[in-house]
Image (spheres, grey):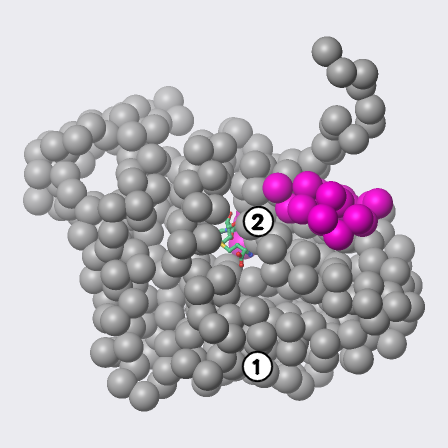
Amino acid sequence: MTAFTPSDCISVAIHRSAQPAEFAASLRRSFERRQIDPKFHYTSARQAAEWLALHKKYSPFIKAADGTAVYDAAFNWAVENLPASSVQLLSLACGGAGKELRLVKTLQRGGKKVSATVSDISVPLVIEGVRVLTREAGLTRVDAVALDLLETEELYEVLTAGAGQRDRRVVTCFGLMPNVDPLLISAQLASLIRPGDVLLVGANLVPAENYEQSTHAVLGEYDNPETRGWLSLLLADCGFEPGDGEIRFAVESCASLPELLQIVSRYHFYRDKAISLDGQTLAFSAGENLRLFFSNRYTPALLKQVFAGAKMKIPGEWISAGKTEGVIACQAR
Ligand SMILES: C[S@@+](CC[C@H](N)C(=O)[O-])C[C@H]1O[C@@H](n2cnc3c(N)ncnc32)[C@H](O)[C@@H]1O
């Protein structure tokens, strides 16, 4: 046995929205509405590990020739536009924090002293975020919060408790826009940004030209055995069995912003099925379906439109040549 050191332990603050009781109730409500919130696909250790493997295989950030270049350009801009010598990074939906690692290294090269808070709905991914930023970027202080960004009231207070009030903040929100309602998330993010702070939002994009056709063209990144396997983990965990139904993928319109297209995965029931969740029995009938997952596909213009609609100014945008990856900078007006 090796001797104990403080780095053997990681402290994660778990907000009510990510605690088991609220989480179970929220999952039950998702099934009752026949609309599963994508957050439920990231939270177990196995889901997090399988998502990290999928991300490595399919993400344009890793795959596209200039995938990292757009992020690096945005990070260099952030260094120039954050005049303070101390910067606090607030990473939202951090996932594996690979993009934040590049940002921290860019800030450090720019002479900034960096402290960080990472957050995500997934405890395993928050822990991965802390691990990456401490071990690979050498940060000595990384706070960690597990929370649902859409269901946390007073998000600012929750995320900045304990942080230096005078530090300028760079807030990152990478890869989340596909998985959440555009109007709800933009309003939440706008509530978090203070004058002088920089919010960087990154997402997989599709070109505006032939928007529908271009969205159909990325269906294969979802309709594949690995993604089906990843999405099936939740179904199996909730008591569904092979033969109860099948997963199908299609392109649909986003309900709250119909001009935005999304890749949607639906579970179609072959037979009647009952499961037990959160102390209740939920019944499904043969022939019905539930939305298992969605991924919004923004064009560069739609992404900006959503944040302009939340009354933010957009002083920078960086889009890859193929328009498959983009980052915008937002600030309080
Ligand atoms: C597609 S991944 C992107 C991860 C990472 N930022 C990246 O760009 O590689 C989406 C992330 O959002 C998190 N997430 C999804 N819904 C969330 C919610 N409502 N609140 C907080 N995190 C959420 C997931 O756990 C996952 O880590």
Q: Position of residue 61 (x, y in %)?
A: 50, 65
The residue positioned 32% from the left and 88% from the top of the image is 209
Give the farthest residue toward the bottom: 209
The residue positioned 88% from the left and 60% from the top of the image is 113
Q: Is residue 57 left or right of 168 when viewed as pictured?
A: left
The residue positioned 37% from the left and 61% from the top of the image is 295
Which of these two is toward me, 104 or 141? 104
Q: Is mark 2 on a helix, strand or loop?
A: loop
Task: Answer whether residue 183 is visible to the viewer in this image.
Answer: no
* Residue range corresponding to the magenta coloring: 128-153
The residue positioned 57% from the left and 33% from the top of the image is 19
Q: In which quarter of the image is the N terminus?
A: top right
> Which kind of residue does numbered mark 2 sit on?
Gly
Identify residue for label 1: 318
Mark 1 is surrounded, within 10 Å at the Cα level, by few (under 14), some (14 to 19) or many (20 or more) other residues, namely: some
For disc 2, does the CB lie below 8 Å from ligand 1? yes
For disc 1, does the CB lie below 8 Å from ligand 1? no
Q: Position of residue 121 (x, y in %)?
A: 55, 44
Identify residue for label 2: 96
Q: Is residue 276 above or below residue 304?
A: above
Q: In which quarter of the image is the C terminus?
A: bottom right
Sequence order check, earlier mark of 1 and 2: 2
**Disc 1/disc 2 C-alpha distance (Å):** 22 Å
Q: Quarter-wise, where is residue 41 in the image?
A: top left
